[in-house]
Amino acid sequence: MKKHYLVLSGLALSTLLFTAPASAGNTTTNPVTKTAAAATTLPVNTEASTMKWNAKKVGGEHYGTIKLANGALQVKGTKLTGGSFTIDMNTIVVEDITRADSNKRLTDHLKSDDFFSVEKHPAATFTITKATLLKVKTGENYSITGNLTIKGITHPITFPATVTINGKSATAAATIEVDRTKYDIKYRSGLVGTAADKIIYDNFTIDLKLTAGETAGKQLGTK
């Protein structure tokens, strides 16, 4: 009888030693699996989107528009993750010259090999490689980095942008500064010994406003 009592006591002790007490700190719960938001591609509405260019020279400037051929933004939830765009170089328009013959002369010159070589390179492209959400609220809420290709030459470029994503639509606005000499556009650049009063400055700007998604045509969302 005493032997049975010892065996039962040993079993009870083992149970106490190796069974975790039922307390809140040791309660085991099944891990919750979080499903990552799926990436969504929002096609750019090329008719509702605008690109305005501005190039300055000593004593003046020229400006106009150019159109996107196509494009798309990639988003996850409310965050921008990527995008790619094609610019139709044949759509260059000069807006500051009103005389038809002078306007055509400059437009043709911009399309020539002195500038964008449009016959050889009818499209320019931009592909986002990094979209960083800015913590400091300064109007622009993203820093965009990507590869810009003009005349078949590709260089990285970074610029701030304002991006709004709302359900299945998005808007984006940015002013992009481009150094034309990186793309073998050196006509009247100071780099090639142009007379001081004939210089066309190396940097030109693109004022870009995009709308994308199902309701892109109705929600411009930018000023």
Image (cartoon, rainbow, N blue to C red):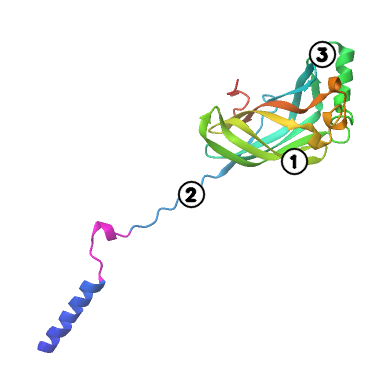
Q: Secondary structure at mark 2?
A: loop
Q: Dot 3: what SS?
A: loop
Percent position (x, y) of residue 50? Answer: 69, 24
**In this view, the mark in front (1 or 2):** 1
The residue under the point 71% across, 27% down is 206
Residue at 23% x, 62% y is 22
In the rendered image of this protein, does residue 21 appear above or below residue 211? Answer: below
**Residue 57, located in which quarter of the rendered image?**
top right
Residue type (three-letter) at the residue carrying disc 2: Thr
The residue type indicated by label 3 comes to Ile
Residue beneath disc 3: 97
Q: CA distance from mark 3 to mark 1?
A: 31 Å
Dot 1: element: strand
User: Which label is found at residue 10?
Assistant: none
Could one spot residue 172 in this view of the protein? yes
Residue 80 visible in the current orientation: no
Q: How many marks?
A: 3
The disc at residue 155 is 1
